[in-house]
Amino acid sequence: MLRRDFLKLSALSVLSASSSAFSAPDAKAVSGRKPNFIHILADDMGWGDIACFGHSKVKTPYLDKMAREGISFTNFYVNGPSCSPSRVGIVTGQFPASYRVWGGLSGNPEVNILNDMIDYLPTDAPNMMKIFNDNGYKIGHFGKWHLGHTPDAPPPSEYGIDQYRRRQDFGHSGGPVWTPQDWQHLRERVDGWDDDDWQPYSTELIIDEGVRFIEEFKDEPFCLNLWFTDPHAQLNPTLGQMEEYKEYNPDAPEGDNFKSAEAVYYSVITNMDKQIGRILNKIKRLGLDNDTIITFTSDNGPEYICIGIGEAAHSGVGTPGPFRGQKHTLYDGGIRTPLIVRWAGHTPKGIVDDTTLMAGSDLLPTMCEIAEIDLPQEITEKFDGIDVSQAWFGTPIEERKPVMWEIRGMANGDYSARSPALAIRWKQWKLLVNQDSSRLELYDILSDTLEVNNVADKYPDIASSLSQQLLAWSNSNPWTKAPLANVGQGPKEYPWPE
Amino acid sequence: MLRRDFLKLSALSVLSASSSAFSAPDAKAVSGRKPNFIHILADDMGWGDIACFGHSKVKTPYLDKMAREGISFTNFYVNGPSCSPSRVGIVTGQFPASYRVWGGLSGNPEVNILNDMIDYLPTDAPNMMKIFNDNGYKIGHFGKWHLGHTPDAPPPSEYGIDQYRRRQDFGHSGGPVWTPQDWQHLRERVDGWDDDDWQPYSTELIIDEGVRFIEEFKDEPFCLNLWFTDPHAQLNPTLGQMEEYKEYNPDAPEGDNFKSAEAVYYSVITNMDKQIGRILNKIKRLGLDNDTIITFTSDNGPEYICIGIGEAAHSGVGTPGPFRGQKHTLYDGGIRTPLIVRWAGHTPKGIVDDTTLMAGSDLLPTMCEIAEIDLPQEITEKFDGIDVSQAWFGTPIEERKPVMWEIRGMANGDYSARSPALAIRWKQWKLLVNQDSSRLELYDILSDTLEVNNVADKYPDIASSLSQQLLAWSNSNPWTKAPLANVGQGPKEYPWPE
C-alpha cells in the first residue's frame, strides 16, 4: 500500500520533471555577473514540518510560494543527524566524519575530548565562505554557528566571512553578538510583546541583518548564510504570533499560562516563514531575482522530545513526515530534510524531484560549478559531495556515488528510532550497520519508506557490497576508536527481567 | 542478535519455571478462607519503566522485592492502549470492543457520541467488584476510575463497591472525593513540601485509604483496587521526592524552576514504589501474607509526549522497553505492560514467565477460579479472558485462544508508532490490519520483538487465517461504523509534496 502510493507519486513527479516544457540552461551562470547565494537553514525542523512538504496544519505561504517558483527535492539528506555534523557537511563539501564531528560541538574542550570530537572546524578545511570570499564574493553569516566555540575557537572572520553576528549563548558565543538592546528596539515596535525573552524575535533579528547586508552589497556578488535557531527548543512565541493557531490553545484556567504545543510550534514555523518572505520580497524589490539563488533546508530531523530543556514539550510536535526516527538517528527521520532551490529564470518552476539522491555536502561543489569557481585539485579531491546543478536545473540525476554517515553514541528516543552507527545510501538502497558488523539492516527505501522491512537476507550481495564499502570508509576516517563507539547504536536488546 | 538474546532469555526462564523445586498447588484456595485480592494499577507506566523489568536507572526496591517473592509475566497485555478500554478489560473479563470503548471515556456525552463510545460501563456488565461482593467479599476502590463519569454515570457503589474515593478532576468526578483538606494534613507532616498541588501525594493518599481499608476488613475476604494516577502526566514531585535523582537536575539558573524530565519521572516512579511498599508491609504485619494475592500492572504503555498537557515533557521519559510504540498504539509498546503476581506460599518465588500469553481480561476468570466462585453460564460465556491460574502457580500455558484488540482514531506520535486499528496475538504471531483489510502486518513476535519485519508474504496461510478471525470478531462487535473508523490507523502515506 505504502509502496504503491509512493511509487505512483515518484513516477508522476519524475515524469513532470523530465517532460517539463522548461528548457534547462547550461549549468553555469547565464548572466554577465556571478549569482548571489542565500542559504537559509532552519534548526531541528523535520521533513514534514512545512506545508509544501505535506503538513496539513501548519501555514507556510512564503515557502510554498518559493517551492512553486523553484524546485523541491524530497530525496535530500544532510550529512549528520544533529547540528554540528550537518553544518560541517554543508560548508566543507565533505562527510563530517572526516573531521571527527558526529554530534553537537561543545564549548568545553573536555567534553569534546570525552566524545572523541574536535573543538572546531579547522580553518584550513575546504570552506564555502572562504572559497567564495577568495573569488570576489562578499560573505555574510547571521544566526547560529555551531562549528566550534571553545575559548580558543577562531571567530567566523577567520573562515572568510566579512560580516557576521551570532547569539551569545546556545553554543554560539564569540564575536559580534546580539545584545538585549538589540531586541529592546523590537519590544518597542512589535505589538503583543509579552516577554522580554529574545526567542520570539530571533529569526526576525537574523533577517534584519540579512536585509541590511543585501542592501549594502546588492551591487556585488554575495554569499549569505541565514541560519536560524527556530524551531529549536526552547520556543516562546508571543500571543500575537500564536493568534493564528489559537484554536490549538485550549481554554486554560485563569492564571495558567499554558500554551499548547501545537500553537507554540506551528506559530514559530509560520513566523519563520513570514521572515523568509521578507528576504524573498527584498530580493525581488531590488531586482535581484534573476541573480540570486536561494536555498532553504533544515539541519536535521525534528527533536524527539527535549527532556533536557525545561518546558519544551512543544518539540515533540515536529514531524519527520513519513520517515522513521528523528534527530540523532540515521534512519531517514534524522537526516532527510526538505530542500527548496529557487533561482528565478533558471530553476524550473514548481517541480518536485523525487529521483535525485542529494546531500548537504553537494551544496559547495554545486555552488562552485554554478559560480564558475575553479578549485585546485587538493580541494576538489577532498569533496565527498558532487556537483548536482543538473538536477537543480530540472534534469534529475539517476545514479551517483553513495552518501555515507557515521555517528557515535548519540542515540536517544525510543528503541525503534535508535539506528546503527553507520549508514550508506546508494540508488534505492539504504544499509545501516555497526562498526563491529553487528546489526546489519538493508532497506529498499523506495518501496519501504519507513525503513522497517530488513531485506538483508533477500539481497545478500547488495548487503555485503554496501557494508564492505561503508566499513572501509569508516576505517579510513580519523577516529581514535574511543570506547564510546556504538553506545546506544548497539543491538536493540533491552535488559530483560531475570 | 535480538532474536538470539531474547530466545536465550526466554528459554532460561521457561526452564527455571518448569524445573523449579517449587511444587505448584492446585489452582484453588488452599487455606480455609478465601484469599484477598489487591490489584495495584499504575497509569501510563511503560513496560520498561521499573527496575525489575530492566530499567537501568530508576529505583523500585519494593516492586523488585515483590517480583523476587512472586512471579513476573513479560508476555502480559492489557486489552486497550489507553485508560478506559484497558480498565474495562480488567473488570469485565471481556474485550472492551464489546462495549464500544476504545479510548478515554469523556465526561461530556457529546464527545462520547462523536467518538462512537458509550458514556459509562453498563452496571449489568460482568464486573469484578460486583461478582466478588455478591460472593461475600468487601470491596474497596481508591484512586482513578475512568469507567465513565458523565453527569448521569452511576457512582462506583452501583458496581458492587463498598468503599471508594476518587479525585474530583482528571475525569474521576462523582462520589466521595478527596478535598484540599485531605492533603492539608500531608502538608503538615511531610518534609520538603513546596507546592500546594495534590500531585506529589496522590499515590500516598490512595495508599492511605488502602491501608485503612485493609485494617478495617482484615478479618474477612476483601478485594481492593488501588488505581494510581501516577505516573500519568502532569507530574509535580517535591524537591524531597526528587532528592534521589538530583544528579539529573542540571544546575539551573537562579530563579529558574526547571526540573529535568528524568528527575521528575524517576522520582515519581520511586515514590509510587515506596507507597506500594507500605501495602506490602501492612499485609505482612497483619499476618495476611498467605491470604492475600497482590497483583501489580499498568493500564497501558507510556505516553508519547503530553503535547496536550502543559509542562509535561517528562512524559517522554517513560519507556516501553524493547517494544515499538507507546500509549494509543496496538504495537506492543502500547499494550504490553508488566504483571507481577505475589501470593506468599502459593506463587513461585522469583520466576519470570516469558511463555504464557496473558491479558487483562484473564484477571477476573482467574480470580474467580482461585476464590472458587462459580459463575452462571450467562456470565462465563461472555468472557474473552480465561483462567490462567495454572501459570500464576508456576506452570506456563503453552497455547491459548487468541487475544484481540480494536481501536479507532486514537493514533498519535510518529508514523512508525501508528498501528492499524485491529490486532490479534496468537502463539508467536501478532497480526495487525485495518477494518477494510488494508495494511496487513504479520510479525513473528518472539524473534521480532520490535515488530518491524512484516512476514505476511512469507506466511500467507497464517496471515489469512488470523485476519479472517480478527475481522469476523470486529464485525460481531456493536460498532455503529461511524465515519471516524481508522482515522490515523490508515495506510501510512504522508501527503507528499506535489
Image: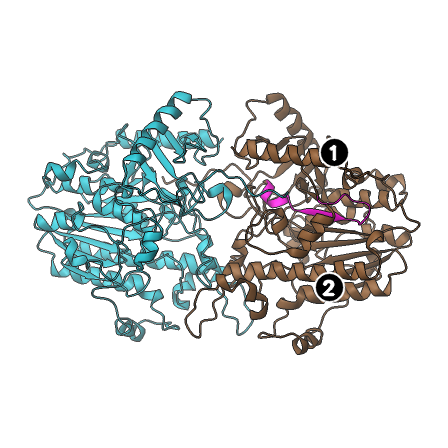
Chain colours: A cyan, B brown
Q: Quadrant of residue B275?
A: bottom right
Which residue position holds label 2? Answer: B207
Does the stretch in magenta take in A186?
no
- Per the rendered image, the range of residues in magenta is B332-350
**Quarter of the rendering occupied by the C terminus of chain B:** top left
Please provide percent x and percent y for residue A230.
34, 58
Q: Does residue A264 sit above or below A382 in this rendering?
A: below
Q: Quadrant of residue A396?
A: top left
Q: CA distance from mark 1 to mark 2?
A: 37 Å
- Give the chain of mark 1: B
Toward the viewer: B172 or A153? A153
Q: Which mark is residue B19?
A: 1
Give left or right: position of B111 versus A418: right
Mark 1 vs mark 2: same chain? yes
Badge 1 crowding class, 10 Å Cα cut-off, few under 14, some 14 to 19, many 20 or more, is few
What element does badge 2 sit on?
Answer: helix
For badge 1, the amino acid type reads Ser
What element does badge 1 sit on?
Answer: loop
* Residue A68 appears anywhere in the view: no
* Residue B136 appears anywhere in the view: yes
Please provide percent x and percent y for residue B477.
72, 39
For badge 2, the amino acid type reads Ile
Can you name the residue that lies furthest to the front here?
B21
Question: What is the tally of numbered marks visible in this picture?
Answer: 2
Q: Which mark is residue B413?
A: none
Please provide percent x and percent y for residue B462.
63, 24
Toward the viewer: A274 or B255? B255
- Give the chain of mark 2: B
Give left or right: position of A448 versus B39: left
Please provide percent x and percent y for residue A281.
22, 56
